[in-house]
């Protein structure tokens, strides 16, 4: 299954494949940390709980045709 997350800071779209919501959260957390360090260095020191909440509220399952 594919999951999509739009960065709330720049609206860049991140897409990952995962079997469960929990797996998607883990993968997005890794991707989000790398994205923030690379593209939003001033936000890189945000607490992990904040990133986790942003991911949970923003991730969506991609509708398949």
Image (tube, rainbow, N blue to C red):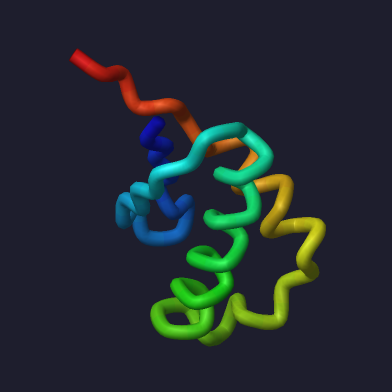
Rendered residue at 18%/13% (across/down): 65
Rendered residue at 72%/72% (across/down): 46
Q: Where does the image place residue 7, in percent across and percent down from the top left?
A: 43, 54
Judge by depth and name the residue closer to the eye, 3 or 57.
3
Rendered residue at 55%/56% (across/down): 27
Quarter containing the N terminus: top left
Placement of 20 over or under 45, stated as above or below: above
Q: Is residue 39 left or right of residue 59?
A: left
Judge by depth and name the residue closer to the eye, 6 or 17.
17
Judge by depth and name the residue closer to the eye, 9 or 29.
29
Q: Is residue 41 left or right of residue 7?
A: right
Judge by depth and name the residue closer to the eye, 57 or 29.
29
Q: Where does the image place residue 20, in percent across and percent down from the top left?
A: 59, 33
Placement of 44 over or under 60, stated as above or below: below
Question: Of all residues shown, which one is farthest toward the front?
Answer: 19
Placement of 48 over or under 22, stated as above or below: below
Q: Where does the image place residue 15, in percent across and percent down from the top left?
A: 35, 48
Question: Of all residues shown, which one is farthest toward the top?
Answer: 65
Rendered residue at 77%/66% (across/down): 48
Q: Total number of numbered labels?
A: 0
Q: Where does the image place residue 56, in percent across and percent down from the top left?
A: 65, 39
Q: Is residue 6 left or right of residue 50?
A: left
When asked about the image quadrant of residue 62, the answer is: top left
Placement of 65 over or under 38, stated as above or below: above
């Amino acid at each position: 299954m594919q999951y999509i997350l739009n960065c709330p800071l720049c609206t860049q779209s991140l897409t990952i494949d995962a079997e469960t919501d929990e797996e998607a959260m883990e993968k997005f957390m890794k991707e989000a940390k790398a994205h923030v360090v690379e593209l939003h260095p001033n936000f890189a020191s945000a607490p992990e709980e904040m990133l986790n909440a942003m991911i949970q509220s923003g991730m969506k399952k991609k509708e398949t045709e």
